[in-house]
Image: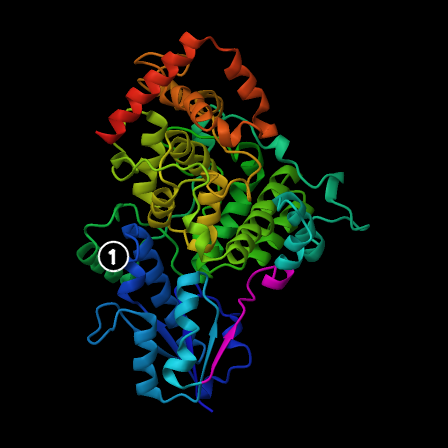
Amino acid sequence: MKTLIPILGDQLSHDLSALDGADPDHTILLMMEVDAETKYVRHHKAKIAFILSAMRHHAEDLRARGWTVDYVRLEDSGNSGTFTGEVARAIERHAPDRIVATEPGEWRVLAAMQEWADRFDVPVDLREDSRFVCTHAEFDTWASARKQLRMEFFYRDMRRKTGLLLDEHGKPEGGEWNYDSENRKPPPNEPLLIPQPLRFKPDAITRDVLDMVARRFADHPGSLDHFVFATTREDALAQQAHFIGHALARFGDYQDAMLTDQPFLWHSILSPYLNCGLLDPLALCQAVEAAYRDGKVPLNATEGFIRQIIGWREYVRGIYWREGPDYAQRNALEAHRPLPGFYYDGKTDMHCMAQAIGQTLDHAYAHHIQRLMITGNFALVAGIDPHAVHTWYLEVYADAYEWVELPNTLGMSQFADGGLLASKPYASSGNYINGMSDYCGKCRYDVKAKTGPKACPFNLLYWDFLDRNEAVLGRNQRLAMPYRNWAKRGEKDKAAIREDAARFLDTLTR
């Protein structure tokens, strides 16, 4: 029996469920670079180059392991431009008796794959993606038993399931499940001691991809000038070892910190490799735990990192699949302002925004606090359309696939799901940014000014955001203190904030 196994660009794993039980002598692996996937949003040039180069390297690795790989390049003659079109052409070439595939990570691709059996009159075995700790059924069971879907309690269940950071009695290591309170230190004044991630020189395969992307996607955002991604599993594992050996120990302390012209700090830069399949998330967490057990890494750093992987990453995936494809259309705060143009060129006088956006355009990367509390916070308090914000995040980050990006953006960052995912909007004035970065000291705006032309826009917009959304947010218990403080302000003060905020927002439109 001849089997055709399509492998997508985020399925670059040797332990893929579609490969379970497959006989290399009777199997064709189909890998497809298709126009529809590069252009359904205007992906960052470096994101496209990373995925395509990783796919080509993975194909070579599969061939070296004895698999037959039918690889369709983006510019091959006859390329149909879609997954379904390329599966149709592969069926003509190979006449398979069946198709076996691992489910995709996005609703729109799943909808297409579910039509293959009827369209091609070939049996299709669509298997669940086994590279995650939590199955769809397990998440649905967990969620169905709760009124509020808070990540912290889900995370504890994942710790119990995996055994990570549990003592001999099955209790959390150190007596606490969460050490986040220890992980909020402002940035240290020691830039020379900040570790740098490994940088990988493009090989011949990657150079060919870079040339093609530069030519074909010239109008897409971002730069290729700083392309140093790992594009093989071997190099991704090297980056993993480098992070554990050189940065993990201080990751916990400074995971929320931000510094001018320091895009990476103590972060792992591993999410692109996890999300495309080059790294295994559970194996990564086990390696991090081993470093803790060996006395090389403190508990707060170990727990904080593992929580991001088996807690938050698994949790947002569960939310994505449980809520369905209409989740992307939610807009609980009725925010409709267009996304400002500076999100695509970084040209703004707000130093924090220029830094976060500038490094995003350079590296297709920003860490979670830059995404949540700089670019996301600004969009939230400015009332930007959450669907436009979602599209931007999906476009510009190398680790962005809809299953992980959409709940993070729409739910956590923009509160557009009305509190399903987050218990409060992650809105702040400039004080938070000033406390966790050196950005404000280098900005033309004054973070201490509350009104007037020099006032930090975050100060104006934060209070204006609370004011204009009071009907929706006024009863949120976690916002009780800010609303009390707003109520105590005099009417003249409130009017000045509203006027200055409106004036600033008008400049965004113009």
* Circle 1: residue type: Leu
Q: Can residue 140 be seen in this view?
A: yes
**The stretch drawn in magenta includes residue 215:** no
Judge from the rendering whether residue 14 lies leftward or rightward of residue 357; answer left or right: right
Q: In this view, does 396 lie to the left or right of 468?
A: left
Which segment did they paint magenta? 123-138
Q: Which residue is drawn at 19% across and 58% down?
A: 216
Please state the horizontal and vertical placement of residue 312, each as a whole percent of the image: 56, 47
Q: Nearer the viewer, residue 52 or 237?
A: 52
SS for tag 1?
helix
Protein image colouring: rainbow
Residue for point 54% across, 15% down: 485
Report the front residue among 430 and 136: 136
> In this rendering, would 319 be left or right of 177?
left
- Judging by the rendered image, the residue that carries numbered circle 1 is 210
Q: Which residue is drawn at 24% across and 62% down?
A: 208
Q: In x, y percent, where is residue 433? A: 45, 25
Q: Position of residue 20 (x, y in %)?
A: 55, 77
Is residue 177 placed above or below 211 in the rendered structure?
above
Note whether 266 is above or below 139 in the view shown: above
